[in-house]
Image (cartoon, helix red, strand yellow):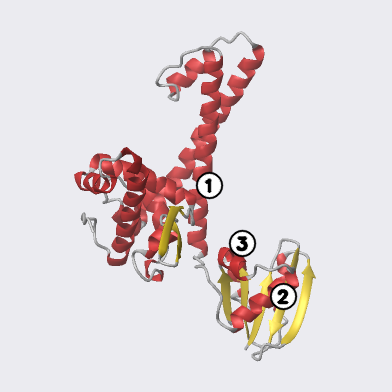
Amino acid sequence: MWYVGLDVHFRRSSYCVLDPGGRVVEEKTVKGPVRKVLAELAQVKRRFAIVYEASCNYGYLHDELSKIAARVVVAHPAQLRLIFKSKRKNDRIDAKKLAKMLLLDMVPTVHVPSPRVRAWRGMIEHRQRQIDERTRVKNGLRALLRGRGIEAPKSLWTKAGLAWLRALPLEEPLDAIRRDDLVSRLELLHAAVRRVEAVLNDIGAKHPGVVLLRSIDGVGIRTAEAVVAYIDQPARFARNKAIGSYFGLVPCQDASGGKNRLGHITHDGPATVRRLLTQAAWQGIRRSAEIRAYYERIRRDDPDRKKIAIVATMHYLVRVMLAMLRTGEVWRFSAA
């Protein structure tokens, strides 16, 4: 079998082919879109394995390369940066290094979900971007009112509140134009979010994993669907504790010479899931005496440990979620 390293970009890509002895069979740079690279690789005369770095189109590439290659490996780009740190770096060199790592079976890999799961994740992220944009519009409206010394009603974002906002007389014509534009955008975003959530609700109601995770106090459909979509296959995690590292909930560590320094959490993995887990943890603390007791045990009645305690609670909840998805059991509290 031959081994191919591919350094792929939107308009220019390079690949390197090695034989089983590590000798270069072919090196080539292809100018043009990805389909031209795929056409070139389809002409490789022997069975080959191929490796490339994960990027925004890694799923599409994996699906297409699987049709022509005996084995497709997707490399973890963050871990490759440490390996490829060099003062001499270009696309051809990177492709050759990737091929050598594949030959030696030393590639740090990433999981590639199915097209359906990738689309599900994309819809979850799309909703989050809509929510963020809607929040920015709301903040813009509140800033406009505060800047004119106008006190807004508490129900400002209801239909009655928006009607009040539209009818509000403003002395400056420019302020009125700004207000009308922001209100129109807010109404469009309200409708867009409802459409997206209707689709996600339908998927979540039919997915047994989402239904299972919602048995945890404080975990709603948004948190459950995000965790299930990003975990995808529970069996790919060797142990439950590995899920904390995957979602970036473990501290940075610098251990050497008997000293162990722990810093802030790594923030690896999807930020959307961490945001939703934060909300679920606070809801669980409010709704469940057991989760609240776990949180208070970590906090030790010390206000300075509040952030540490909430992250520990998030870490605990996501470990429980992975265990539930592995076994199919409903939630039962365990302070372990």
Number of marks present in the image shown = 3
The label number, if any, that marks residue 15 in the structure image:
2
Instruction: State the residue at coordinates (24%, 49%).
Output: 294
Instruction: State the residue at coordinates (40%, 55%).
Output: 227
Rendering coords of residue 92 (x, y %): 74, 73
- The one nearer the camera, 9 or 205, is 9
Instruction: State the residue at coordinates (70%, 82%).
Output: 17
Instruction: Using the image, determine if residue 155 lies above or below residue 205.
Output: above
The label number, if any, that marks residue 55 in the structure image:
3
The numbered mark, 2 or 3, whose residue comes first in the sequence reads 2
Residue type marked 2: Tyr
Rendering coords of residue 331 (x, y %): 24, 55
User: Which residue is under mark 1?
Assistant: 126
Residue type marked 1: His
Looking at the image, residue 123 sits to the left or right of residue 172; the answer is left
Q: Secondary structure at mark 3?
A: loop
Rendering coords of residue 130 (x, y %): 52, 40
Looking at the image, residue 160 sits to the left or right of residue 88; the answer is left
- The one nearer the camera, 318 or 258, is 258
Instruction: Using the image, determine if residue 148 lies above or below residue 41.
Output: above
